Image (cartoon, rainbow, N blue to C red):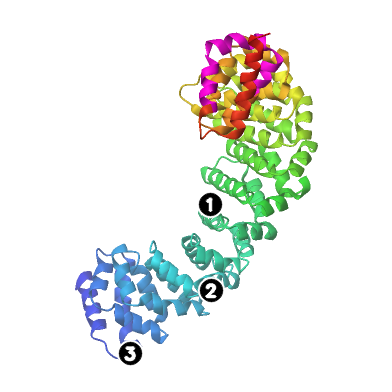
């Protein structure tokens, strides 16, 4: 008898069984299982078509000694995607779920695998599983049998498939699942297991509630510890783990409360590790470190504290490493961190004294629009409300020449807009005649005039304020650019615009009055 004949005979015998006598069914189930384990061609489909699925469901429902073997048959059969829907229709998932309450570890393993495979990529069935209360049981199994590697793996894979669902996150938020995941992360035998756990943490960490819970239960510290243990190696799997974990850390810091807990007034383990990432030779850690610092710098208190602790030189050194043919993402993240740190007024003064503006000007030679855009925004934040910084930068001929180039960036509207805004900020915050003359010398007034007709009210406002200040300080430097731009008709048109913003019209009037007075002096 061939293997195919043997399988057919076994399926026929099971299909005509009415009493479900265990002694009679077991040898036939053995043959079916052997065919599935040997991966005989179309064996799973033949099983599904034979009509025995309802009989298997009955056997599972009876919770007999055959349950473990039947669950294994279903698990092996469900490797084949084509048979999963027939398994659902036969009610196999519904009768398998109660077996997750067993204290038989083999039955737990087989039932978990069967359920996981049948419900894979089926959102409706996954939702039904969550509603049936499977989440608490999965966590309990990992707590009860933390050293049963195959069983833990099944539970982790199940959680990984369910963790994107809001209902699953809500259930897990009640279970303090972090301690289980941390334990398994530390015990992970290989990179594959680490990645599954990190993926679960990443999905769950999208919930603000779980972000805070993770911070309170030590997830960031566990991630830091894992990264420390893997640093310095060259194994691609380990490098991948570092990337996933450091990205996850940055994500957890997006929550205000979780971020503050990790910061720990600058003395927290997580903050100290993040600081070390800036000095790492691993580009991914440098990037995550800069992004994490930018996240920590979301309130004035943290910004002032970080300046006290000396974070700025580390960021500047990192940026200088990537000036020529460096990583654009690292430069962008580093500048974001500096920009956030420069928001408190007291920090602006200290950063200027520490030579920040001089050092970041090395990035002026960058030809990457994302870096140019972020650099301009950082410089604008540095001069915001800070007269001395505006004076220093506004007198810098090389800087002004580069700003002029970016004011004409044809392929990047963002760079063009930020360059014009920085130009306006230099005049607005310095209110100095020398700066006005330098901007006029560099042919920058025409860009401010162009900015005044922007579709963005805030940019119109900034440009008109700058033009009004420049006109009041040094009308002589403004006459030719105003005349060449034919400014008066443009201002008149804007004043007559019935939908124009009131604050814009007020500033237009100021510019017009300055020009009028200049003509009649």
Residue 261 visible, this angle: yes
In the rendered view, tell whether residue 383 sits above or below residue 262.
Answer: above
Callout 3: SS = loop
Decide which of tag 3 and tag 1 comes sooner along the chain. Answer: 3
Residue 220 is covered by the magenta coloring: no
Q: Which residues are magenta?
A: 466-495
The rendered magenta stretch, by its main secondary structure, is classed as: helix
Q: Quadrant of residue 190?
A: bottom right
Left or right of 336 in this view: 5: left
Q: Are marks 3 and 1 in contact (CB under 8 Å)?
A: no
Residue 454 visible, this angle: no
Q: Quadrant of residue 448?
A: top right
Report how far apart the C-alphas of labels 3 and 2 lie in the structure: 31 Å
Residue 477 is covered by the magenta coloring: yes
The residue nearer to you, when weighing 262 against 389, is: 389
Q: Which mark is residue 259?
A: none
| Nearest-to-viewer mark from 3 and 2 | 2
Residue located beneath label 2 in the image: 137
Decide which of tag 3 and tag 2 comes sooner along the chain. Answer: 3
> Which residue sits furthest bottom?
19
Q: Are marks 3 and 2 in contact (CB under 8 Å)?
A: no
Q: Residues within 10 Å of mark 2 (few under 14, many from 20)?
A: some
In the rendered view, tell whether residue 31 sits above or below residue 414.
Answer: below
The image shows residue 270 at horizontal and vertical percentages of 70, 48
Residue located beneath label 3 in the image: 21
Callout 1: SS = helix
The quadrant of the image that shows the C terminus is: top right
Decide which of tag 1 and tag 2 comes sooner along the chain. Answer: 2
Residue located beneath label 1 in the image: 191
């Amino acid at each position: 008898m061939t293997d195919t004949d043997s399988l057919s005979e076994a399926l026929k015998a099971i299909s005509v069984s009415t009493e479900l006598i265990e002694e009679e069914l077991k040898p036939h189930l053995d043959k079916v299982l052997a065919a599935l384990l040997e991966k005989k061609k179309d064996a799973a489909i033949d099983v599904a078509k034979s009509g025995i699925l309802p009989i298997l469901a009955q056997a599972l429902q009876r919770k007999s000694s055959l349950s473990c073997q039947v669950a294994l048959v279903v698990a092996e059969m469900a490797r084949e995607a084509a048979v999963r829907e027939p398994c659902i229709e036969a009610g196999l998932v519904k009768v398998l779920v109660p077996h997750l309450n067993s204290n038989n570890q083999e039955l737990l393993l087989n039932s978990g695998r069967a359920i996981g495979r049948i419900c894979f990529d089926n959102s409706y069935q996954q939702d039904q599983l969550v509603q049936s209360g499977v989440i608490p049981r999965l966590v309990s199994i990992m707590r009860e049998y933390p050293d049963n590697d195959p069983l833990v793996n099944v539970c982790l894979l199940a959680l990984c498939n369910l963790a994107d669902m809001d209902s699953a996150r809500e259930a897990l938020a009640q279970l303090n699942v972090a301690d289980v995941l941390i334990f398994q992360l530390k015990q992970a035998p290989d990179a594959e297991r680490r990645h599954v756990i990190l993926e679960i943490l990443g999905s769950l960490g999208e919930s603000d509630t779980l972000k805070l819970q993770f911070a309170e239960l030590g997830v960031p510290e566990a991630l830091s510890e894992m990264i420390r243990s893997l640093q310095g190696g060259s194994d691609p799997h380990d490098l991948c783990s570092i990337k996933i974990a450091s990205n996850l850390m940055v994500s957890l810091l997006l929550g205000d409360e979780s971020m503050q807990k990790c910061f720990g007034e600058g003395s927290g383990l997580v903050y100290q590790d993040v600081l070390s990432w800036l000095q790492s030779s691993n580009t991914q850690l440098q990037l995550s470190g800069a992004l994490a610092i930018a996240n920590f710098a979301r309130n004035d208190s943290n910004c002032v504290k970080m300046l006290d602790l000396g974070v700025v030189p580390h960021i500047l050194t990192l940026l200088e490493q990537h000036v020529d043919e460096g990583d654009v993402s690292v430069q962008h993240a580093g500048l974001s961190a500096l920009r956030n740190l420069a928001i408190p007024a007291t920090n602006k003064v200290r950063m200027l004294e520490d030579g920040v503006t001089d050092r970041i000007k090395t990035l002026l030679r960058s030809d990457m629009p994302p870096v140019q855009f972020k650099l301009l925004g950082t410089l604008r934040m540095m001069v915001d409300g800070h007269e001395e910084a505006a004076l220093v930068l506004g007198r810098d001929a090389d800087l002004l020449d580069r700003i002029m180039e970016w004011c004409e960036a044809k392929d990047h509207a963002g760079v063009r807009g930020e360059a014009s805004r920085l130009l306006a900020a230099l005049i607005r915050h310095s209110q100095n005649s020398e700066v006005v003359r330098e901007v006029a010398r560099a042919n920058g007034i025409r860009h401010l005039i162009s900015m005044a007709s922007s579709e963005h009210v805030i940019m119109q406002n900034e440009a008109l304020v700058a033009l009004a200040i420049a006109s009041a300080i040094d009308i002589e430097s403004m006459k030719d650019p105003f005349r060449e731009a034919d400014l008066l008709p443009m201002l008149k048109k804007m004043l007559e615009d019935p939908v124009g913003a009131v604050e814009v019209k007020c500033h237009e009037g100021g510019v017009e009055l300055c020009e009028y007075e200049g003509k009649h002096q």
